[in-house]
């Protein structure tokens, strides 16, 4: 086994949203990958939570991009892992995201349908010709007030009028929401890949991308109960 290279600590906590004997639901911070991969090994939600809980069977039922924050569900026991992973793989979970971007007068709701591809090893995904394989609903857009706008400008510098976008993906293509926002003329504030790829060494963990999974809704595959989990994390953190 190779020794992991030194990693910059992610300067955010991982609040627990819900826990029972089968699942652990947390509010993942930005800059923390879901699982170990490439140069991100220790500073991942899976490793950090296994260490803090002492449970080495803890396993994510789905994934969030490293730069995306929000609700992330882990199974606590090997015996229940398949039931929850199947739930996500079968798209039986309704996911709601929020993003901050330049305010645009969309007449909501809007359906976005595109053909997306992403080549392993390349940073950006692509939009191209072909049958739509990525589907997103833009539920609504709300303008930010002056105080909220000032808070974002304190991090990102002067901005045009900003809005809060509420999104529901119906498919799970890599970078789907980021690509759909960019394609629609409103790239997500703080996105280091769309439209311009910033060098990795320029990353500043005090300047996050403002995309968060704020809600997960599903019928529990074991109990049959309706589950509804909400993020309490502000997009500025």
Image (cartoon, helix red, strand yellow):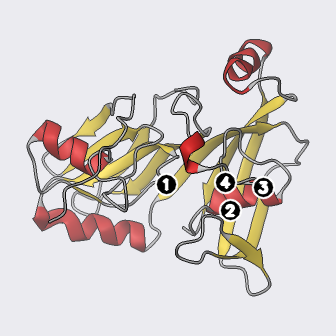
* Crowd rating for badge 4 (residues with CA inside 10 Å; few <14, some 14–19, many 20+): some
Image-based side of 168 in relation to 34, left or right = right
Residue at horizontal 16 percent and vertical 36 percent from the top: 52
Name the residue tied to disc 3: 182
Q: In this view, does 137 lie to the left or right of 218?
A: right
Find residue 126 and report its horizontal and vertical position in percent: 71, 72
Whichever of labels 4 and 2 marks the residue nearer the N terminus, that label is 2
Residue corresponding to mark 1: 65
What separation in Å lies between label 4 and label 2 (alpha carbons)?
Answer: 20 Å
Residue at label 4? 193
Tell me the SS state at disc 3.
Answer: helix
Between the C-alphas of marks 3 and 4, the distance is 10 Å
Looking at the image, is mark 2 or mark 3 earlier in the sequence?
Answer: 2
Please tell me which of labels 1 and 2 falls first in the chain: 1
Instruction: Check disc 2 and report its element: helix, strand or loop.
Output: strand
Most distant residue in the top direction? 147
- Circle 2 packing at 10 Å, graded few (<14), some (14-19), many (20+), is many
Q: Distance between the residues labelled 4 and 1?
A: 12 Å
**Label 3 neighbourhood size at 10 Å, few (<14), some (14-19), many (20+)?**
some
Q: Which of marks 4 and 1 is nearer the N terminus?
A: 1
Question: Callout 1: helix, strand or loop?
Answer: loop
Mark 2 vs mark 3, CA separation in Å: 13 Å
183 horizontally vs 65: left or right: right
Name the residue: 65% across, 47% down. Answer: 192
């Amino acid at each position: 086994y190779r020794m992991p290279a030194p990693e910059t600590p992610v300067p955010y906590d991982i609040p627990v949203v819900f826990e029972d004997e089968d699942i652990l639901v947390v509010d993942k911070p930005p800059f923390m990958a879901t699982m170990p991969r490439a140069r991100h090994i220790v500073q991942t939600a899976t490793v950090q939570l296994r260490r803090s809980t002492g449970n080495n069977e803890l396993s994510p039922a789905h994934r969030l991009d490293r730069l995306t924050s929000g609700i992330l569900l882990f199974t606590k026991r090997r015996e229940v892992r398949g039931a929850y992973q199947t739930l996500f793989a079968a798209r039986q979970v309704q996911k709601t995201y929020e993003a901050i971007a330049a305010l645009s007068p969309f007449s909501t709701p809007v359906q976005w349908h595109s053909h997306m591809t992403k080549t392993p090893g390349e940073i950006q995904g692509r939009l191209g010709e072909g049958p739509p394989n990525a589907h997103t609903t833009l539920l609504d857009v709300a303008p930010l007030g002056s105080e909220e706008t000032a808070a974002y400008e304190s991090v990102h510098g002067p901005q045009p009028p900003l809005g809060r976008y509420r999104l529901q993906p119906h498919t799970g293509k890599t970078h789907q929401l980021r690509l759909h926002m960019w394609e629609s003329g409103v790239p997500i504030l703080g996105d280091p890949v769309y439209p311009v790829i910033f060098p990795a060494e320029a990353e500043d963990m005090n300047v996050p991308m403002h995309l968060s999974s704020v809600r997960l809704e599903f019928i529990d595959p074991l109990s049959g109960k309706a589950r509804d989990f909400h993020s309490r994390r502000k997009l500025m953190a």
